[in-house]
Image (cartoon, helix red, strand yellow):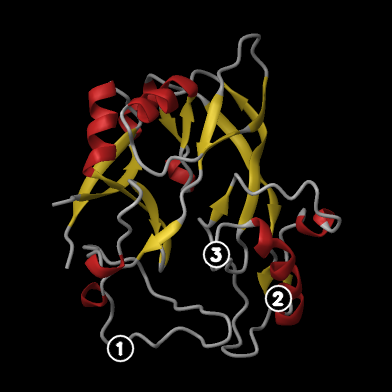
């Protein structure tokens, strides 16, 4: 039976590995301004597709600034991107695309970026995960600019939203998602439970679909990390129901 783990940054490694970057994705869907269904202005955080390349899209410049837009404009821009995105992607307001762009410096741990809900790995780490047959890995080169003479090769993992939190760990009076924009606001439970029926069976790394900042790895992923001796990541097992 597959076991599932909530992935968090291991801050104990920050004294040894002091690599850091100041970056953001290259392109963004706008946030939603004053949803006509629920009235809320909002954008997701965590839904990021670094492998989705908008560079050949004639309208690509319209995706370079993070901003809120009315619903009709969000829909127009989302429809332009949808053919380039993975099938069945929700593409919530604020979803981002393309490589991380910015500056970086220092010595990087095998895993970094989890504090920002991304996973950035060194090339040797990525190769090790692939050799261990971790399923569903999509690695994308970052567009980070380093000051040192021999910069590391850093790869960002594309982690797609797939599973769900189980309703038993959510507030009993939680309102259903907005029928217009899909927003359903709640605080992450102290003791999350995963909905077994919703969990993917073809990947060892995914985001929780109804809470995109929560990144989940299977026991296969955990074993590969530990057998490789890679640091920078902590594992908290979550129950499944």
Check disc 1: other Cα within 10 Å, few if <14, some if 14-19, many if 20+: few
Residue 226 appears left or right of 9: left
Q: Do callouts 3 and 2 mark residues in contact (Cβ within 8 Å)?
A: no
Please identify, in this view, whether the residue under mark 3 or under mark 2 is nearer the observer.
2
Q: Which residue: 38% across, 22% down? A: 15
Q: Give the alpha-carbon distance from disc 1 to disc 3, as whole Å.
A: 22 Å
Tell which circle, 3 or 2, labels the residue nearer the N-terminal end.
3
Pointers 1 and 2 in contact (CB under 8 A)?
no
Write down the residue under mark 2. 75
Quarter in which the C terminus is drawn: bottom left
Element class at badge 1: loop
Taking the image as shown, residue 113 lies to the left or right of residue 2, namely right
Under circle 3, the secondary element is loop
Q: How many marks?
A: 3
Residue 31 coordinates in the image, percent (x, y): 66, 68
Residue visible at 55% across and 62% down in the picture: 87
Residue 228 position by quadrant: top left
What label sits on residue 233 in the rendered view? none
How packed mark 2 is, by other alpha carbons closer than 10 Å (few <14, some 14-19, many 20 or more), is some
Query: Residue 33 placed where, x, y %?
Result: 69, 77
Q: Nearer the viewer, residue 81 or 226?
A: 81
The residue carrying mark 3 is 44
* Left or right: 196 as drawn, with respect to 185: left
User: Is 61 displayed left or right of 208 in the figure?
Assistant: right
Q: Which residue is mark 1?
A: 173
């Amino acid at each position: 039976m597959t076991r599932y783990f909530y992935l968090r940054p291991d801050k104990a490694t920050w004294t040894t590995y002091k690599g850091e970057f100041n970056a953001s994705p290259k392109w963004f869907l706008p946030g939603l301004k004053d949803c006509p269904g629920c009235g809320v202005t909002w954008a997701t955080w965590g839904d990021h597709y670094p492998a989705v390349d908008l560079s050949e899209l004639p309208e690509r410049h319209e995706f370079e600034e993070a901003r809120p837009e009315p619903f009709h404009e969000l829909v127009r821009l989302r429809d332009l991107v949808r053919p380039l995105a993975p099938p069945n992607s929700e593409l919530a307001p604020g979803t981002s695309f393309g490589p991380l762009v910015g500056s970086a410096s220092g010595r990087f741990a095998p895993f970094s970026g989890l504090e920002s809900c991304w996973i950035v790995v060194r090339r040797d780490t990525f190769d090790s995960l692939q050799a261990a047959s971790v399923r569903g890995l999509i690695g994308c080169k970052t567009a980070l600019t380093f000051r040192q003479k021999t910069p590391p090769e850093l790869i960002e993992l594309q982690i797609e939203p797939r599973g769900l939190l189980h309703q038993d760990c959510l507030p009993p009076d939680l309102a259903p998602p907005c029928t217009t924009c899909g927003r359903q606001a709640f605080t992450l439970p102290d003791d999350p439970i995963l909905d077994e029926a919703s969990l993917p069976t073809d990947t060892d790394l995914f985001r929780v679909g109804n809470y995109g900042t929560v990144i989940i790895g299977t026991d296969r992923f955990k074993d590969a990390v530990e057998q490789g001796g890679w640091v920078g990541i902590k594992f908290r097992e979550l129950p499944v129901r």
